[in-house]
Image (cartoon, rainbow, N blue to C red):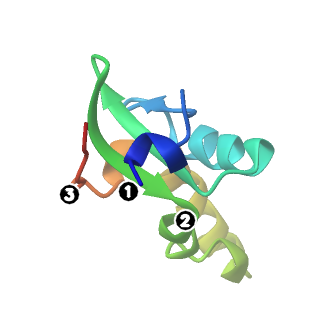
Amino acid sequence: MLAEDIMTRDPLAVDESIALAEAFRLLAESDVRHLPVLRDGELIGIVSDRDFRGLGLSLVNDVKSLDALQQRMRRGVSDLMNGSVISVD
């Protein structure tokens, strides 16, 4: 079996400068669990639904926590992505 037999062709990907909030929206609306992160069209990382769970999105229960989360979600996706990716031809 080859990678091309099971891979997703033309996956949804985002630029490293996209806000975390926008990446989270894309994950939810597109029903995908991973977004490759690109810089000038080159793969530099990946962000997943698990990365967002680590932010405690479901645990916000007070205004101070919500404010902190809203500020964090305005930051670039490169702040949350995993930069240790392995790719193959």
* Relative to 41, residue 79 above or below: below
Q: Earlier in the sequence, mark 1 or mark 2?
A: 2
Residue 76 in view (yes/no): no
Q: Amino acid at mark 3?
A: Ser
Q: Is disc 3 placed on a helix, strand or loop? A: loop
Question: In what quadrant of the picture does the C terminus appear?
Answer: top left
Name the residue: 68% across, 40% down: 26
Kindly identify the residue that appears in the image at 25 percent across and 44 percent down. 88
> Which residue type does callout 2 highlight?
Phe
Query: What residue type is disc 1 on?
Result: Leu
Q: Which residue is mark 3?
A: 84
Q: In this rendering, would 63 be left or right of 42? A: right
Q: Please name whichever residue, 66 or 73, is drawn nearer the observer in this view of the structure.
A: 73
- Using the image, tell me which numbered label, if any, was put on residue 52: 2
Task: Give the Cα distance between marks 3 and 2.
Answer: 17 Å
Residue that badge 1 annotates: 80
**Is 61 placed above or below 87 here?**
below
